[in-house]
Amino acid sequence: MVNDNEIKAQVSPFAIREGEIKTFDGKDGYVSMNQIVHKINIGHINEIHFAILDLVNEFEFITSRQLYQMLEIKGIDPKSQDKLNNKLDQLVKSKILTRYYFTSEEGKGIYRIYCMEKMGKYLLNSREVECKWQPSDNIKPVAMIKKRLAGNQTLIAYLRKVKAFDSYVVKPAITAKLSGKLFKATGGSVKLTKNNKSIQFVFEVVRREQDWERKLVDKVRLYKDFYENYVPGDSGFQSLPQLIFVCEDEKHIVETYKEIVKNQIEIPKIKLYFTTDLRQNEETLENTLVEFKLVDGKYKVEDVELKLLGV
């Protein structure tokens, strides 16, 4: 598999493309549970298939490359991307998983995404694994899925490249106290621990979807409510987490911060950090974050160097 730092993409695969639609690439028709049980009994579906199923259940939407990386992190050898893809094909044909790709005016997407199917939920339930999947989950719009995929990439980068990595949550739930609203950080969260001291990063993925500026403002207002009324232990955080916006590209970082300033929704209690999808491909994440500082009356982007993010 190509290493992250060897990827030469100029545009993130998880950026929004004009006119993009999600296209079904799964299996139509009926598959009985008896057929699946038979495949399990003869070893055609085995423990690595269940490990894949667990990951899809956890992440909701995920690419085959992300699955490969997560299996490696969990100490499971997928052998090769092709062998993993063959296993994914088996799961799709058995309607345990289903698959989509994106098409736009620029052409067909270069990767497929995997998500749960009803047989997958039945199999997980049979092993007493909680699965909250509902068929309606698979009709989520492109922007929502791409936020999840970009969030996956960020979490995986921290798992693989940050020595201080401790744990992660894919969809952390946060409560905005005054409004009483429960919301989720679209990119997940990670806990980093060094010398018995811990800090948590919360990732909010921003995409240039339709009406994205208004959606961003609404979401940041919820974060502002949470941070300004925070007491230790709120939403499971023992100390104030660091908020990081994951943007599509460098220009999008500026556009995102501009919306925050324009709408006067800065959060005084914390610094706002920003990064991009492609920055996660760097060998080390030490220099992947930026912040805005007011210099001579103008906002200037400056790199944030965090030794804690070293390998």
Image (cartoon, rainbow, N blue to C red):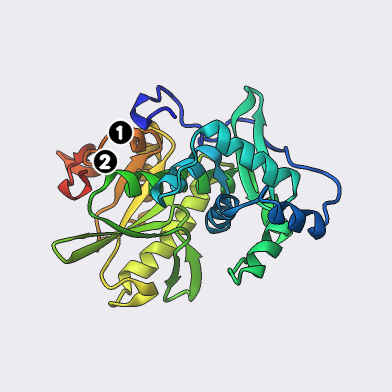
Q: Is residue 267 above or below residue 1?
A: below
Nearer to us in this view, 271 or 184: 184
What amino acid is at disc 1?
Glu
Marker count (numbered): 2
In the displayed structure image, the side of residue 267 where residue 286 appears, left or right: left
Nearer to us in this view, 145 or 249: 145
The percent position of residue 211, horizontal first and vertical second, equals 56, 45
Residue wearing tag 1: 282
The Cα–Cα distance between marks 2 and 1, rounded to whole angstroms, is: 6 Å
For the C terminus, the quadrant is: top left
Q: Quadrant of residue 189?
A: bottom left
Q: Is residue 235 visible?
A: yes
The percent position of residue 106, horizontal first and vertical second, equals 62, 22
Q: Is residue 300 above or below residue 189?
A: above
Tell me whether circle 2 and circle 1 mark residues in contact (CB < 8 Å): yes
The percent position of residue 112, horizontal first and vertical second, equals 61, 36
In the displayed structure image, the side of residue 43 where residue 150 appears, left or right: left
Q: Residue furthest right?
A: 29
